[in-house]
Image (spheres, rainbow, N blue to C red):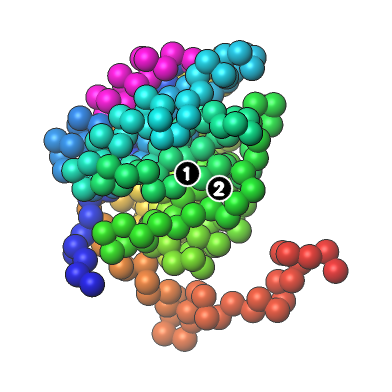
Amino acid sequence: MTVNPAMRIAVGQLAPLIADVDENLMTVSNILQKAEKVDVDVLVLPELCNSGYAFKNKGELSASAEPIPEGPMSQELLAWSGGGRLVVAGICERTSEGFFNSAVVVGSGEHITTYHKIHLFLDEKDWFLPGDEEPPVIEYRGYRFGVMVCFDWAFPEVARVLTLQGAQVILHPANIVLPYCQDAMVTRSIENRVYTATANRTGIERGLTFSGASQITDVKGSRLTQMGRDETGLAWVDIDPSLADDKAITERNDLLEDRRPSLYRRLISDD
Ligand code: ACM
């Protein structure tokens, strides 16, 4: 298979307005236009970018949620991706089962998959059902991309499971509240030898301050780019995802082969 030697990957940072789906759609649309102008191949947008985060009640949540892929934000992303691009964005999703804090993945005009966040943070537990499927890795243009959402960062098992599925790049929509996430994602890169792209939101919403500082790390945990706390817009870098296939830490240590899973049984059982 022929693959491109490099891809341009970007993180979009914005301050969604709570429950203002039209305004949020316009803001995202502006970022998509910028991303198109600079030839971005892969774009990550923040968690819940159609809806905002701090809902007041179920009515507000319901009015902000959309079905995937029929909803307006999903359709906007599908249209943008039609030129041979991949985008992952956090969506407040309505389904027949209930509401999910989701990451929609669309590429080349197709809905590829939707990930339902599995680790819900604080009051998210009041609004959303937790996902109960393994976070996905999708292949796109010869490379492999894993998806997780915000608070999944606090569970290193998630990035490891994505790595074990072959992810070379972890795409990470976020609405970061705790101050350690960006640093933790540096560690997720180092301990898995993968690129990570965290798209965080910014702004203050009903007393919650979001930390911006969206970033992209390389496979050794160096930050290739990081936005400011209050900045909005886009940051991008060119990467070669195949560098993530080399898991050597020293000439005698391989990150995956040197594991001792028989000694990690407590990860899956209390016995
Ligand atoms: C978070 O998971 N949005 C903190």
Q: Which residues are magenta?
A: 18-31
Instruction: Give the amino acid type for the residue marked by disc 2 in the picture.
Output: Trp
Return the disc, 2 or 1, that comes first in the chain's sequence: 1
Q: Which residue is mark 1?
A: 114
Instruction: Give the amino acid type for the residue marked by disc 1 in the picture.
Output: Thr
Depth check: 91 or 74 in front?
74
Q: Measuring from the top left, give residue 147's x and y in whole percent.
A: 46, 50
Depth check: 248 or 62 in front?
62
Q: Quadrant of the N terminus?
A: bottom left
Residue, x 27% and y 25% (percent of image)?
29
Q: Is residue 257 visible?
A: yes
Q: Is mark 1 within 8 Å of ligand 1?
A: no
- Spot the residue most to the bottom: 252
Residue, x 50% and y 60% (percent of image)?
162
Q: Which residue is mark 2?
A: 153
The answer to the question of whether label 2 and label 1 lie on touching residues, with beta carbons closer than 8 A, is no
Q: Measuring from the top left, give residue 63's x and y in whole percent.
A: 52, 15
Residue, x 45% and y 58% (percent of image)?
137
Residue, x 69% and y 26% (percent of image)?
126
Q: Main secondary structure of the magenta part?
A: helix
Query: Is residue 15 found inside the magenta-colored segment of the image?
Result: no
Q: How many marks?
A: 2
Q: Is mark 2 within 8 Å of ligand 1?
A: yes
Q: Measuring from the top left, give residue 154's x and y in whole percent.
A: 60, 48
Question: Looking at the rendering, which quadrant does residue 109 occupy?
Answer: top left
Depth check: 10 or 130 in front?
130
